[in-house]
Image (tube, grey):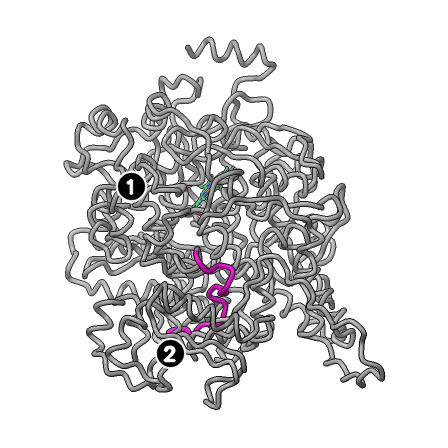
């Protein structure tokens, strides 16, 4: 078999793998794991790593004699470079902009680089010093490569019929603003002949593809220490902020952001390239200031992958060129920054002199637009029609069943919300980083297809030849790449990976194989001591946020029993979390099964509720006009705004496969002309217009209302005042009455219509329909319970209803019982 592969390889002109090729693969893998940290953070990382490993070693046999909490606190202190530097950190509560490195997100340091990951279940290493997970009888778990080949041979691949490849790559793009786990010390260079506790290797001796290669390995992840119920355990570390602050565009430190910014200007550096404005090259940044070199060095591409020798491109995250679609996402949001900055200046040219203000405002808009894409398009597309099954639909961006019936009448949750003041700060769960969100690896297709402005296929290239290679991005351009990704579907999530990542990850040019990403993911889960799939399944079935995901679920794939028998010695309690997640049948309409969905749901809920800089928080803007502006920009609009002249039409739901119904809606093509005017900052930053004197003659025609932009909802809902406001939207009193009547009849809850303008302080606008708690009493009464519940459910305002100052007669316990998820709101 091996012979025939090498014969085939030489027939194709390929050559056997050499040491240089191995170095290419190792270099590419280490790029993925090495963030461009500042000196300070890099030093803290190395310090905490040696402190943690030394401590674990020196505590052998002495466990229990030290306070795990105290030692974990020391480790935490080391990971905060500000704790040891002379730099005094001042965190103004009214600071209008997030820090690049996330400092001041939370007093505990949450949201800053080098935080340890959180866990949904305690770590389960093979021994107390953190050896990779093994079987409960201490025997090794199945060979990772053996598992990946077995699953590929037993499980049929199926095409993804629900979502496009664009959704998949959005997941990767967002991963790269959230997290990057570092390898252990640079001093150890793992190889097949080395036995080191810093390396995790597995045999590929008789592998049908990896001819002449005896093993595969990963360098183990760096760790800090955490206190796990009084036990000191290793915990992996995030080099990024663990928040969606567009760090992948601006970098995760002041100096990185400075390197990307055009000096003295609100704009980001760019270069004119083959298809318009691109992100800058590292040569360009180095020429500007040599002190940026330590950062740009982390973007150098391995010549065995970038065989044509293109100048590497530069951005906020050094994985930017891992594949050409990812690079296109970077270009989109990079360009968007400059478009936003230009809009602000156009609105008020005098702002040109305040470049910091314009830069910061544009960045903040960009962050908000990226977050909106995640919560209103990416998460809903991933969960499909099962979104309501997670935590009572708390991640749903619009009212659930109510929306389906009244989508045309009521606007979704689009008023700012009040964040809990007792939040504990953002955290990334290890299970999310190391298992659930790697679901995307299993969806990789074999090719990158680009399309021209008419959506005709323009080019097709193998993914295997384009890892860390800018070629397709430069030849075809980001617009054609995005059009291709948004209209093509890859594989459905599952245990049978495509060849592009199963055998050919980081395949050097001219060689016939690379490495196996599935095997790496399995090994990584063990390196991080993730508990088994079965333990999570059991826990989540009882979890209030996730139990619903398992109701009516169709169970594991048909190959499950054979897998457990053939690979895990009939011990289903030992199946790796990642393997188990991929073996679950998908939830209805979703791209994953319940265990993956539970972890992903918990992660995005945590990011939403715990990040100081979540864009829907009232304090994010303290300005509803800006909030409203963000709410108008969806991904289709971002594509139209950023992808240049050839972008005339876009799918209105770029993540949803053609013909697949999401919440009863299927995608259609829309004209960019109808979307681009959704971005209008002239009123927000411009001078208010002088009132014009009334015309001398009355106009002959009554002024017609400008057409409402597509999908613009008709009414606003104010969660604090509990008022639905349809004023100034062309409603007359009769239609308001009719709408109220429909609400009364279909939902049987009290609806009060005040079409003449109320005297009440809360009722600020005339022509408002108040639908909740209407008897003139702003407090909730016991009899209002049903109403209140309905409102929460339908408007999904669980976290925003401010009922602290009301005459609440319902006992708190009663409310907790019904709404455990709003417990935090009661102070
Ligand atoms: C061509 C596409 C992709 C390639 C080649 C790729 C490659 C990789 C590699 C090599 C790693 C490091 C593995 C390790 O050593 O543990 C990784 C990590 C990861 N990938 Fe991907 N990936 C791709 C797409 C995606 C997508 C689409 C998603 C999500 C939807 C994703 C999510 C992740 C996550 C969450 C991690 C963990 C990051 C960390 O802990 O640092 N990746 N990927």
Query: Is 105 a magenta residue?
Result: no
Q: Label 1 vs label 2: CA separation?
A: 39 Å
Residue at 74% of width from left, 70% of height from top?
Answer: 345
For marks 1 and 2 on the same chain, the one whose residue lies earlier in the sequence? 1
**Quarter of the image where one finds residue 647:** top right
Kind of element beneath mark 1: helix
Q: Which residue in the structure is indicated by mark 1?
A: 577
Residue that badge 2 annotates: 802
539 vs 579, left or right, is left
Q: Is residue 124 left or right of residue 176?
A: left
Check if residue 418 falls in the magenta segment: yes
- Res. 327 visible in picture: no
Q: Secondary structure at mark 2?
A: loop
Q: Closest to the observer: 194 or 465?
A: 465
Look at the picture and state if 436 lies above or below 498.
below
Q: Tell me the quarter of the image containing the N terminus.
A: top left
Q: Which residues are magenta?
A: 405-420
Name the residue rendered at 48%, 75% in the picture: 618
- Mark 1: few, some, or many residues within 10 Å (few <14, many ≥20)? many
């Amino acid at each position: 078999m091996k012979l025939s592969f090498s014969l085939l390889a030489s027939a194709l002109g390929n050559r056997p793998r050499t040491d240089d090729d191995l170095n290419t693969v190792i270099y590419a893998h280490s790029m993925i794991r090495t963030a461009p940290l500042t000196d300070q953070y890099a030093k803290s990382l190395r310090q905490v790593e040696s402190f943690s490993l030394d401590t674990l070693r020196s505590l052998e046999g002495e466990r229990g004699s030290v306070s795990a909490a105290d030692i974990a606190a020391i480790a935490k202190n080391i990971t905060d470079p500000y704790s040891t530097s002379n730099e005094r950190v001042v965190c103004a509560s009214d600071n209008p902009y997030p820090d690049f490195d996330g400092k001041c997100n939370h007093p505990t340091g949450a949201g800053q680089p080098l935080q340890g990951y959180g866990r949904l279940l305690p770590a389960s290493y093979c021994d107390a010093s953190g050896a990779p997970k093994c079987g409960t009888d201490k025997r090794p778990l199945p060979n990772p490569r053996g598992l990946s080949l077995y699953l590929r041979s037993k499980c049929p691949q199926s095409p993804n019929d629900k979502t496009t490849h664009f959704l998949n790559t959005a997941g990767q793009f967002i991963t790269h603003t959230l997290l990057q786990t570092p390898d252990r010390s640079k001093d150890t260079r793992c190889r097949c002949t080395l036995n080191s506790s810093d390396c995790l290797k597995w045999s590929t001796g008789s592998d049908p593809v990896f001819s002449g290669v005896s093993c595969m390995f990963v360098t183990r992840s760096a760790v800090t220490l955490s206190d796990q119920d009084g036990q000191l355990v290793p915990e992996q570390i995030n080099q990024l902020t663990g928040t969606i602050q567009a760090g992948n565009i601006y970098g995760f430190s002041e100096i990185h952001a400075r390197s990307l910014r055009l000096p003295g200007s609100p704009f980001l550096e760019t270069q004119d390239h083959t298809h318009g404005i691109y992100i800058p090259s590292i040569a360009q940044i180095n020429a500007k200031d040599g002190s940026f070199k330590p950062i740009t060095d982390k973007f150098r591409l391995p010549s065995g992958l970038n065989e044509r020798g293109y100048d590497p491109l530069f951005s906020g995250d050094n994985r930017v060129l891992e594949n050409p679609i990812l690079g296109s996402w970077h270009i989109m949001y990079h360009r968007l920054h400059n478009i936003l900055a230009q809009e602000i200046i156009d609105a008020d040219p005098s702002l040109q002199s305040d470049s910091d203000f314009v830069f910061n405002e544009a960045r903040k808009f960009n962050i908000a637009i990226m977050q909106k894409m995640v919560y209103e398009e990416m998460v809903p597309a991933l969960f499909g029609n099962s979104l309501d099954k997670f935590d009572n639909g708390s991640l749903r961006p619009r009212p659930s069943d109510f929306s389906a019936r009244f989508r045309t009448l009521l606007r979704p949750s689009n008023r700012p919300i009040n964040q809990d003041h007792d939040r504990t700060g953002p955290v990334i769960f290890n299970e999310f980083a190391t298992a659930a969100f790697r679901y995307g690896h299993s969806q990789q297709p074999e090719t990158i297809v680009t399309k021209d402005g008419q959506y005709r296929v323009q080019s097709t290239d193998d993914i295997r030849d384009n890892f860390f290679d800018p070629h397709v991005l430069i030849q075809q351009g980001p617009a054609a790449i995005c059009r291709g990704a948004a209209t093509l579907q890859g594989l459905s999530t599952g245990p049978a990976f495509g060849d592009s990542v199963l055998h050919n990850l980081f395949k050097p040019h001219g060689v016939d194989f690379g490495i196996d990403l599935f095997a790496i993911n399995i090994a990584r889960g063990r390196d991080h001591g993730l508990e088994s799939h079965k333990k999570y399944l059991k826990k989540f079935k009882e979890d209030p946020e996730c139990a619903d995901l398992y109701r009516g679920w169709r169970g594991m794939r048909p190959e499950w029993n054979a897998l457990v028998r053939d690979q895990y010695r009939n011990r289903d309690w030992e199946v790796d979390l990642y393997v188990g997640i991929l073996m679950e049948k998908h939830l209805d309409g979703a791209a994953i099964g319940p265990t993956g969905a539970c972890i992903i749901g918990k992660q995005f809920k945590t990011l939403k509720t715990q990040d100081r800089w979540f864009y829907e928080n009232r304090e994010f803007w303290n300005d509803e006009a800006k909030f409203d502006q963000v709410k108008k920009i969806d991904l289709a609009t971002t594509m139209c705004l950023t992808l240049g002249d050839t972008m005339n039409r876009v799918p209105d739901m770029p993540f949803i496969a053609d013909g697949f119904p999401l919440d009863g809606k299927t995608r259609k093509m829309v004209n960019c002309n109808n979307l681009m005017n959704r971005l209008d900052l002239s009123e927000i930053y411009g001078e208010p217009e002088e009132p014009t004197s009334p015309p001398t003659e009355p106009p002959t025609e009554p002024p017609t209302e400008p057409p409402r932009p597509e999908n613009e909802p008709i009414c606003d809902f104010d969660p604090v005042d509990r008022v639905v406001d349809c004023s100034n939207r062309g409603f007359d009193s009769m239609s308001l009455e009719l709408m109220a009547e429909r609400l009364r009849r279909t939902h049987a809850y009290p609806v009060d219509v005040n079409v003449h303008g109320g005297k009440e302080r809360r009722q600020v606008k005339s022509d408002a329909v108040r639908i909740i708690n209407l008897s003139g009493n702003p407090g909730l009464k016991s009899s209002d319970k049903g109403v209140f519940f309905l409102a929460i459910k339908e408007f999904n305002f669980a976290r925003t209803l401010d009922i602290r100052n009301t005459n609440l007669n319902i006992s708190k316990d009663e409310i907790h019982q019904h709404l455990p998820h709003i417990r935090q709101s009661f102070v």
